Image (cartoon, helix red, strand yellow):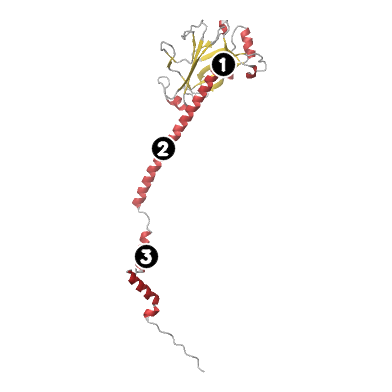
Amino acid sequence: MKAPRIHPRRCSSAVRCGVSAHSSRHSSLLGLRAVPPSIGSRHRGRSAAAFTLIEVLVSSAVLSIVMFILLSTLGTSLSLWRTTESNISADREGRSANMLLAQDLANAVVPANSALWPQVTSNSLGFLTLRPTGYQTGSGDVGDLCFVEYKVERDTNSTGSTNFMALTRNFVGSAETYAAVKGGSLPAPVVGNAQVLAANVVPNRRAIFYNNDINNAFFHALGSNSLPVAANQRPAIIDVTISTADEETVRTLDITNKQLRTVGYFGFRVALPKP
């Protein structure tokens, strides 16, 4: 029995390319036209092209302008923040110093002996005051009569600018104070013991008396009529005015001839007790 012969089936070009024929037929039905491979390749290459040199230059210029504006704004904000922080610090120091000074003056003692009266100059104020023994640090301090001196002087820790001044406080305990008072005089404070209460103190420019005299002094001894007293007269009122400013203002501006808006003025008056 002979094996059947298998004859290869011959297909027409339409059959052999049935897929292509169907694709062509569907494309023609949809109204589409086949695109040659070379044209498609050129189209894809054109869409993936980079920016031109003009576009890059314009973008860089716009970015530079935006960055300059942002950096300028940031620098201004930082400078304003530093100035505000310095103003707050100077204001806090001025208020704390005035509160301590007012507390000492509220407990001031004015004996009948004129040698023991408060010593007042334009930039210093020394007087007897009462402080409890728990406040004092000396081993021999057993009483409450002490001496305290406030002084406004050039800040030796600054950069050498003559505008920088500081308010200092020098406290003398009861042991040394009793010994000096017993001898009929006020004690002499040790310069090295002075404590800085407020830095960046500036000269005062204000109308203090009824006659509107401008006086740059920080401390004034006044009579009961609120007018300055003579050297041999007992003061009835102590007038204090401390002005502070931020470091940048003190460093750069002429504070002696200008009324500064950024200066904080702290002042008060205390009536002294009678002997």
The tag earlier along the polypeptide, 2 or 3, is 3
Q: Position of residue 87 (x, y in %)?
A: 47, 27
What mark, if any, has residue 213 been given in the picture? none
Question: Is disc 3 placed on a helix, strand or loop?
Answer: helix
Assess disc 3: are there few (<14), some (14-19) or many (≥20) residues with their C-alpha within 10 Å of its C-alpha. few
Q: Position of residue 119 (x, y in %)?
A: 54, 11
| Quarter-of-image position of residue 111 | top right
Q: How many marks?
A: 3
Question: Is disc 2 placed on a helix, strand or loop?
Answer: helix
* Residue farthest along the front direction in this orientation: 29
What mark, if any, has residue 41 been given in the picture? 3
Q: Position of residue 15 (x, y in %)?
A: 39, 80
Residue bearing the label numbered 2: 73
19 or 247: nearer the eye?
A: 19
Q: Amino acid at mark 1?
A: Asp
Residue bearing the label numbered 1: 104
The tag earlier along the polypeptide, 3 or 1, is 3
The tag earlier along the polypeptide, 2 or 1, is 2
Assess disc 1: are there few (<14), some (14-19) or many (≥20) residues with their C-alpha within 10 Å of its C-alpha. some
Q: Tell me the CA gap for discs 3 and 1.
A: 94 Å
Q: Amino acid at mark 3?
A: Ser
